Amino acid sequence: MSWTPDGYVAVVTMYNFQQYRHIQAPGWTLGWTWAKKEVIWSMMGSQTTEQGDCSRFKGNTPHCCKKDPTVVDLLPGTPYNQQIANCCKGGVINSWAQDPANAASSFQVSVGSAGTSNKTVKLPKNFTLKAPGPGYTCGPAKIVRPTKFVSGDKRRVTQALMTWNVTCTYSQFLAQKTPTCCVSLSSFYNDTIVNCPTCTCGCQNNTAGSGSCVDPDSPFLASVVSAPDKSGNNPPLVQCTSHMCPIRVHWHVKLNYKDYWRVKITITNFNYRMNYTLWNLVVQHPNFDNITKLFSFNYKSLSPYGDLNDTAMLWGVKFYNDLLNQAGPLGNVQSELLFQKDQNTFTFDKGWAFPRRVYFNGDNCVMPPPEAYPYLPNASSRPAISLLVTILISLALLLNFAQ
């Protein structure tokens, strides 16, 4: 934004362009390595976690002298003289589709012992982003066209002295070794409840799995849940189940009308250490092109394949059910969806009424195998009954003739 006697003042902005993956509390952590011997004199809207060794400076002491600073967002309620626009949200960044107005986070940094021109400034390297854990991989910084700013009256355009971009991509496989979500299914036309596949996210007696579990009926439940985690990694402490997943999404085909059909979705949290704020669910099903009514969830069509409208993003209503509480009696949210039938494609046969894919907070949920889906009752018993009736009638006729 401007030059200083020994460096520059820059504004760093992180944009979350992901449609349905947000960064939730405790928020993002951004790091990099200086190319030379730069220091951070001051910051607004954020702070470094460590100051480092600043003993070589006499008088004014820099905010941070580390070669590889780690930056975190400031908390809500920060004094106004320490804020800039889009800062101080505790590191929380919403997803682009869910809340584009809050899908960015910014801070200002004053850098010293750096270059004072476009030719002498060296770009930082080795960028890292944790949100809050692993999963993101950042590429190198690249110089791009200077950012332009339009005045409030839109009559004047100014621009930055220098701008560079860093792109970070997410991988679910880097974030965690095991899945974090699974799907169970049921229907009104079959008494079978298809649970999540066994050991989807780990097994109860597997110490190398996704972590420990707690029996919800244990008398020591409260003490185990409240005990601090000594590892510092905050691993999930899940309720003991056959699937051992922190999140289960249940899809129930509830009712069938002449021109419509109804589905109930329930999201259950089995993690005793996590409240999911600003959660979202993405579901792929061909009938989302004709959804009629949605109860107690927000809805947005994503249309990832051009004109094919078969993917929906669902999330909670603010101040009502946008918080998915930790495991327990209140650890679930639910809604019902009403679809209008397309007589050319609609059927309950062969599992058509169940979703093709489900994502919770951007992570793919494990579906049951197709052969396990609840099936329509077949008519195999009717020929047997008809055959039995025919035999009985034939026997009766024979007896009559015999008499």
Image: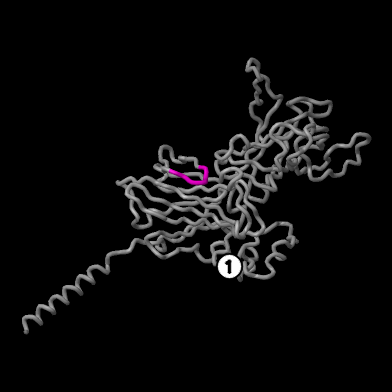
User: Residue 5: x percent and y percent?
Assistant: 84, 26
Residue 126 in sight: no
Residue at 66% x, 25% y: name it: 146
Quarter that holds the C terminus: bottom left
Residue lying furthest top in this view?
155
Q: How many marks?
A: 1
Residue 220 occupies which quadrant of the picture? bottom right
Residue at 70% x, 40% y: name it: 89
Residue nearest the viewer, comparing 148 with 269 = 269
Quarter that holds the N terminus: top right
Q: Eyeballing the image, is 388 above or below 317?
A: below
Q: Which element is circle 1 on?
A: loop
Residue at 10% x, 82% y: name it: 399
Question: In the figure, is residue 341 to the left or right of 216?
Answer: left
Q: Eyeballing the image, is 119 above or below 199?
A: above
User: Residue 54: x percent and y percent?
Assistant: 88, 41
Question: In the figure, is residue 196 to the left or right of 287?
Answer: right
Residue 9 occupies which quadrant of the picture? top right
Q: Main secondary structure of the magenta part?
A: strand
Residue 370 occupies which quadrant of the picture? bottom left
Inspect the magenta stretch and tell me whether residue 59 lies in it. no
Q: What stretch is highlighted in magenta?
A: 293-298
Residue type of the residue flagged with mark 1: Cys
Residue lying furthest bottom in this view?
403
Residue at 68% x, 29% y: name it: 163
Name the residue carrying label 1. Answer: 203
Q: Residues within 10 Å of mark 1 (few under 14, many from 20)?
A: many
